[in-house]
Image (cartoon, coloured by chain):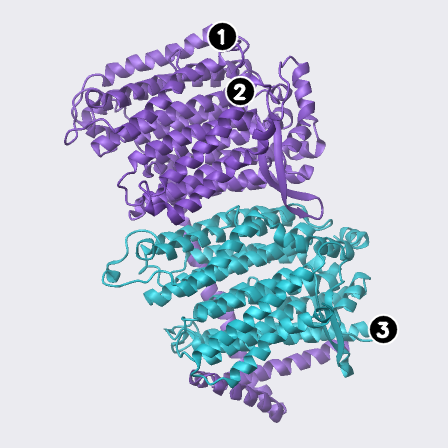
Chain colours: A purple, B cyan
């Protein structure tokens, strides 16, 4: 079936032919398993080692990266790969088959590379960052579970395996957010993340059931084929099923209003925030939308406007929240939510490549920013920007790499974010979402604005914390450099209309099914839109610098943008958290307690009353029964009982005999009635 | 292995009973001999059930054909036979039963509750094993009834003698009574109440079968009669209802569940484990083995009601969990929700739903069994189950805490662990139930069931937060805690491994069940019945 789509792609001008990847693709499953092996090694042997098992985690991703890189390069140079290996784990009679396996196609290869590359860099960084932590061993164990589950998710050939990976990364997220579980606030942050995602997962699971049962198959390949060929059964459930799947994606990818867990998730150690809550895990929702893209392109078009709207709200409204946060990780968290909004908007609007390209570039620069923030936090022992300031003098590497990341995020040419954001704008314009396109341009302004604020408050002015901050060790700064380079350059991989010699471009790498799916991607640079996006970003930087460039001593002075109504609204996060938690908190407790009350007083009340009633009746029936027979039974009971222990004697109060008598009598009477009636 | 064909099942069923009798001859103070004896007996029984798997012919075969069948005349006067047999549906449950029993004996090694007396306790466990194993292989209603009821007595004594002595105020009772007394009597009478009706149903079937030939209690013959549409109308309605009461109490389904939290909370650890792991499965198994095949049409017309009760159980049980302050009681209530999923699967009357129910039973047996082990070991150390007094267990006993976290995750249905498949497939089944069943009811059930998974996650995380996480309370400052000991480890690791293996590779269960279930559905819900349901509704 892939072949068919590939041919279709070729006919429509895609210059690609699919290859099967040979030995490397056949063995790519090793990548998915390695982190779990590492998990067991860490658990059983980790504590004896210098980094308490971090070595195994790094090793697993290091070996995985070999596969990912080989496949990535093969995909670029030797024709786009399209391959999958599966094995059956269950077959239910009426034709439902569950399989596990791995896919090797442009989309999954991109994700393998991303997860292994960024993962490895972050893991190495974590060796330094977590040194001396109370639970390094647990940290790397959970981190390995994450890496494994994420690879299981992106390699999934079907919805079922995706659900397994999906909740697996959710588990890792819960464990790592609550890494410092002595403090119940962190535990509650983990609970909030897990529960919000679990609510969304209802959508994922029901959506999967709807589309999977419709065609009797949960395979992405089969679902794509059915969607492309306008399958009627799938068409009947496409709108509802599509929206349900999207609801699932909203949880993991933190779309408004289910974004509330992500900022709280920053309670986890910073490497976790970098890898999971910025670069990879939170993109799972986007990835799901990309995998199911043919459905939305061919059958569930009606669902698109809603999805685009959610994405647009997310990218703009939640981006604004980054302006009022004092915690540097929260700034980045809101920024992540906002960027996920961009990706979602793009994919929803029909920009498959645009959304995924932004996912790709964002992973590098946002991981970089988080690791930079981690380096700063490591130095000043505080998350609050009010304890920072002037750090560019003390931490030059961190400073420079952070600036590169910020400019890439803000979308300044020629850094990577510029190209990917521009492509999103082009998609929105081309698909007729003009209003949303302007919101996205305004979002670019906001992005540049809050990043300028963060850079100014952190690295400029006077240092306001305690002690003498110093640059982080090489184990931490080298990863920053390793991420700064792709953050700066990887935008060049997909300049519209430019095919790099020998390797083509990002669009082509993902192209196996893209053309058949009707993806729009720009054929040439739209200079007008590029200028608008860039202009908005530059304006944001300029305005930000005007306001925050000048050093302000106190937090009050820094919050100089205290616009009435808006400022409190932002500080309270639009009251969404308050409302959600308020409603849940106010209702669940009383509901649960009233259920328990009903259980104790109503249902059990009836049971106890029935007991009392039968006791009374039993006394009456007892008199007219053959006493010897019953007594024989009862005495037999007590003989056994006497042997069993002295405590039992208390039981022989007569109640049992009477009950037993009643039931035996009742049964006999009813049996007679029954038999006569029939 | 011809002798095994005819003697295998009998051995699996009665070896524990023989063991119990032998233990009876050992003086009570020879504790070591008693424990080793019980271990040898349960291991031998488990070993036999492994041989059974080895010799079992998987795949193929139409429903209502059994392997390792024994059929001897037993009580000639009423044509009751000693008829045993195993098929793809009962095999996993039988093996689960023999397997968990070994672990229970291992765990018992150094966990005895007041008033001690290992001899009596081990004997009761072995008698229980005979009852449970027998229920899963009985093919005669009288035999089934006897095995079904045998389990009552040992469990009644376990709860009543070794149970929790804390006095409790029970609403409607003037004085406080010991938890174990109230719980054991309630357990016994509640179940007996259901069983009385069940027996009525069996008797009615027996007499009715006389209209089509010789009167019989034989499940195989009654299934044949049922598939031919012999039992219909008011008769079928009443019989199904009577059996429903008996099975539903045992499952337990809402609103017949209130014996369960009390029994679980009061029972000694091993009692709770066996209760959760196996006893609860007797009822749901009986629905699959007896109610559906013998009264298919009636089952289909009861299906919506069963689905509704199942879903109420899911939501209600989960909500009740959120209100609990006692850790063990919380786990007990979680069974109401989980068995709700099992019953929802059965109510769909589809191959997917019934497969879901069986894997759900196995998974629940392992997961909730393990949770009760953990709750028992923790209250053994803390001498309290009040979650308000616990907390920071991860710090005091990291290994125990880790296993608790794992099991809680399995219990909330984390995909990749055993609990997921039963829940997920029950939902798949309810999306498309048997033709003719009301889609509205089942699809609503699907959505509510899915919402139930959220609540399940809610109370499991709540429990972890209360018990495992945070700082330990000051009252434990001077206590020495011993983390998991080797007996506990030996008992738990096999469960953990199986929970993972079934989660990743559910085929090891489905390989046994699928064909039998498909054939069951085909046999009993052939096109005629589907058509008659459709026209009827």
Q: Is residue A34 left or right of residue B432?
A: left
Q: Are marks 1 and 2 on the same chain?
A: yes
The residue tagged 3 is B213
Q: CA distance from mark 2 to mark 3?
A: 72 Å
Q: CA distance from mark 1 to mark 2?
A: 16 Å
Q: Is residue A572 left or right of residue B336?
A: left
As helix, strand or loop, the secondary structure at mark 2 comes to helix
The residue tagged 1 is A526
Which numbered circle lies on residue A674? none
Check whether the beta carbons of the residues at disc 1 and disc 2 lie within 8 A of each other. Answer: no
| Between B259 and A188, the one nearer to me in the picture | A188
User: Is residue A678 in sight in this rendering?
Assistant: no
Q: Are marks 2 and 3 on the same chain?
A: no
Quarter the N terminus of chain B occupies: bottom right
The residue shown at (42%, 45%) is: A41
Residue A512, position in %: x, y?
Answer: 61, 22
| Between A579 and A350, the one nearer to me in the picture | A350
The residue tagged 2 is A353
Q: Quadrant of residue B66?
A: bottom right
The residue shown at (64%, 45%) is: B431
Residue A496, position in %: x, y?
Answer: 51, 11
Q: Is A559 situated above or below A49?
A: above
Residue A7, position in %: x, y?
Answer: 68, 19
Nearest to viewer (mark 2 / mark 3): 2
Q: Which chain letter matches label 3?
A: B
Q: Which chain letter matches label 2?
A: A
Q: Which chain letter matches label 1?
A: A
The residue shown at (41%, 12%) is: A533
Q: Is A305 situated above or below A151?
A: above
Q: Earlier in the sequence, mark 1 or mark 2?
A: 2
| Between A145 and A417, the one nearer to me in the picture | A145
As helix, strand or loop, the secondary structure at mark 1 comes to loop
């Amino acid at each position: 079936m892939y072949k068919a789509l590939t041919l279709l792609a070729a006919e429509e001008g895609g210059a690609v032919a699919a290859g099967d990847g040979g030995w490397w693709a056949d063995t790519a499953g090793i990548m998915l398993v390695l982190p779990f092996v590492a998990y067991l090694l860490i658990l059983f042997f980790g504590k004896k080692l210098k980094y308490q098992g971090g070595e195994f985690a790094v090793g697993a991703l290091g070996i995985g990266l070999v596969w990912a890189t080989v496949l990535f390069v093969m995909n670029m140079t030797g024709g786009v790969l399209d391959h999958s290996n599966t094995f059956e784990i269950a077959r239910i009679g009426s034709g439902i088959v569950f399989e596990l396996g791995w896919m090797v196609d442009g989309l999954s290869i991109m994700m393998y590379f991303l997860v292994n590359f960024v993962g490895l860099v972050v893991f190495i960084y974590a060796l330094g960052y977590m040194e001396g932590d109370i639970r390094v061993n647990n940290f790397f164990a959970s981190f390995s579970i994450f890496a494994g589950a994420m690879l299981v998710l992106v390699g999934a050939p079907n919805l079922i395996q995706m659900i397994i990976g999906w909740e697996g990364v959710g588990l890792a997220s819960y464990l790592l957010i609550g890494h410092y579980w002595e403090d119940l606030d962190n535990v509650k942050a983990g609970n909030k993340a897990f529960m919000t995602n679990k609510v969304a997962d209802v959508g994922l699971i029901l959506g999967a059931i709807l589309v999977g049962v419709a065609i009797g198959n949960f395979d992405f390949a089969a679902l794509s084929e059915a969607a492309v060929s306008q399958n009627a059964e799938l068409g009947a459930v496409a709108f509802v099923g599509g929206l349900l799947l999207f609801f699932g994606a909203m949880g993991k990818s933190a779309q408004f209003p289910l974004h509330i867990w992500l900022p709280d998730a920053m309670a986890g150690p910073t490497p976790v925030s970098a890898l999971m809550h910025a670069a990879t895990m939170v993109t799972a929702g986007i990835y799901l939308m990309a995998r199911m893209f043919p459905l939305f392109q061919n059958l569930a078009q009606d669902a698109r406007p809603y999805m685009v709207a959610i994405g647009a709200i997310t990218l703009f409204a939640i981006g604004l929240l980054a302006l009022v946060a004092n915690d540097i990780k929260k700034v980045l968290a809101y920024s992540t939510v906002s960027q996920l909004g961009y990706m979602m908007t793009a994919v929803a609007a029909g920009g498959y490549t645009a959304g995924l390209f932004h996912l790709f570039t964002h992973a590098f620069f946002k991981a970089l920013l988080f690791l930079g923030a981690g380096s700063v936090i490591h130095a000043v022992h505080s998350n609050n920007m009010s304890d920072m300031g002037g750090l560019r003098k003390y931490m030059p590497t961190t400073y420079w790499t952070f600036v590169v990341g910020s400019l890439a995020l803000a979308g300044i040419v020629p850094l990577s974010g510029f190209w990917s954001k521009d492509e999103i704008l082009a998609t929105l314009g081309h698909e007729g979402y003009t209003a949303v396109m302007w919101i996205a341009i305004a979002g670019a302004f906001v992005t540049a604005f809050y990043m300028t604020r963060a850079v100014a408050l952190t690295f400029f002015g006077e240092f306001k914390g305690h002690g003498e901050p110093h640059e982080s060790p090489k184990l931490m700064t080298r990863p920053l450099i390793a991420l700064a380079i792709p953050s700066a350059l990887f935008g060049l991989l997909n300049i519209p209309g430019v095919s790099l010699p020998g390797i083509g471009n990002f669009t082509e790498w993902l192209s196996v099914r893209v053309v058949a799916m009707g993806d729009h991607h720009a054929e040439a640079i739209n200079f007008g839109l590029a200028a608008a996006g860039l202009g908005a970003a530059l304006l944001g930087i300029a305005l930000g610098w005007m306001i925050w460039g000048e050093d302000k001593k106190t937090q009050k002075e820094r919050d100089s943008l205290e616009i009435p109504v808006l400022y409190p609204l932002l500080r309270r996060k639009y009251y969404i958290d308050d409302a959600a938690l308020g409603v849940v908190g106010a209702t669940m407790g009383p509901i649960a307690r009233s259920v328990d009350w009903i259980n104790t007083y109503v249902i059990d009340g009836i049971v106890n009353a029935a007991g009392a009633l039968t006791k009374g009746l039993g006394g009456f029936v007892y008199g007219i029964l053959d006493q010897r027979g019953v007594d024989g039974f009862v005495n037999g009971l007590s003989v056994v009982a006497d042997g069993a222990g002295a405590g039992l004697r208390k039981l022989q109060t007569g109640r049992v005999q009477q009950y037993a008598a009643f039931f035996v009598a009742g049964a006999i009477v009813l049996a007679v009635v029954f038999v006569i009636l029939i | 292995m011809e002798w095994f064909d005819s003697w295998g099942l009998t051995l699996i069923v009665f070896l524990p009973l023989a063991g119990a009798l032998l233990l009876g001859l050992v003086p009570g103070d020879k504790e070591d001999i008693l424990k080793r004896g019980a271990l040898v007996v349960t291991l031998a029984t488990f070993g036999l059930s492994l041989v059974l798997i080895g010799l079992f012919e998987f795949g193929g075969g139409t429903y209502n054909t059994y392997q390792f069948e024994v059929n001897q005349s037993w009580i000639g006067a009423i044509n009751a036979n000693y008829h045993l047999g195993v098929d793809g549906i009962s095999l996993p449950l039988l093996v689960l039963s023999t397997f968990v029993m070994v672990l229970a004996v291992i765990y018992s090694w150094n966990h005895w509750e007041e008033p001690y007396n290992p001899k009596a306790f081990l004997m009761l466990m072995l008698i229980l094993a005979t009852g449970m194993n027998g229920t899963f292989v009985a093919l005669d209603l009288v035999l089934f009834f006897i095995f079904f009821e045998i389990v009552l007595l040992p469990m009644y004594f376990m709860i009543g003698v070794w149970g929790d002595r804390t006095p409790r105020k029970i609403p409607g009772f003037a004085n406080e009574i010991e938890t174990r007394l109230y719980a054991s009597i309630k357990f016994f009478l509640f179940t007996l109440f259901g069983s009385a009706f069940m027996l009525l149903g069996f008797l009615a079937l027996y007499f009715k079968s006389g209209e089509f030939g010789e009167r019989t209690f034989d499940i195989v013959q009654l299934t044949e009669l049922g598939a031919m549409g012999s039992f219909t109308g008011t008769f079928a309605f009443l019989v199904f209802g009577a059996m429903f009461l008996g099975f539903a109490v045992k499952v337990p389904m809402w609103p017949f569940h209130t014996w369960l939290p009390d029994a679980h909370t009061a029972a000694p650890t091993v009692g709770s484990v066996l209760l959760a792991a196996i006893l609860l499965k007797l009822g749901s198994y009986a629905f699959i083995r007896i109610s559906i095949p013998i009264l298919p049409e009636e089952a289909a017309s009861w299906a919506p009601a069963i689905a509704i009760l199942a879903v109420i159980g899911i939501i209600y049980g989960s909500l009740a969990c959120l209100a609990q302050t006692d850790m063990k009681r919380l786990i007990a209530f979680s069974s109401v929700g989980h068995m709700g999923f099992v019953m929802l699967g059965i109510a769909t009357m589809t191959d997917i739903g019934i497969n879901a129910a069986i894997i759900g039973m196995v998974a629940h047996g392992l997961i909730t069994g393990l949770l009760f082990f953990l709750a028992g070991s923790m209250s053994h150390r803390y001498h309290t189950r009040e979650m308000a007094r616990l907390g920071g267990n991860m710090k005091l006993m990291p290994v125990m805490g880790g296993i608790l976290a794992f099991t809680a995750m399995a219990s909330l249905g984390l995909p990749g662990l055993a609990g997921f498949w039963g829940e997920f497939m029950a939902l798949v089944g309810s999306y498309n139930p048997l033709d003719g069943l009301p889609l509205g009811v089942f699809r609503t059930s699907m959505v509510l069931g899915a919402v139930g998974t959220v609540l399940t996650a809610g109370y499991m995380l709540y429990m972890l937060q209360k018990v495992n996480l945070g700082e330990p309370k000051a009252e434990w400052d001077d206590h020495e805690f011993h983390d998991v000991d080797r007996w506990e480890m030996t008992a738990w690791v096999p469960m953990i491994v199986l929970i993972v293996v079934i989660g990743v590779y559910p085929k090891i269960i489905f390989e046994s069940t699928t064909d039998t279930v498909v054939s069951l559905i085909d046999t009993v819900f052939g096109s005629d019945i589907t058509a008659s349901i459709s026209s009827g509704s």
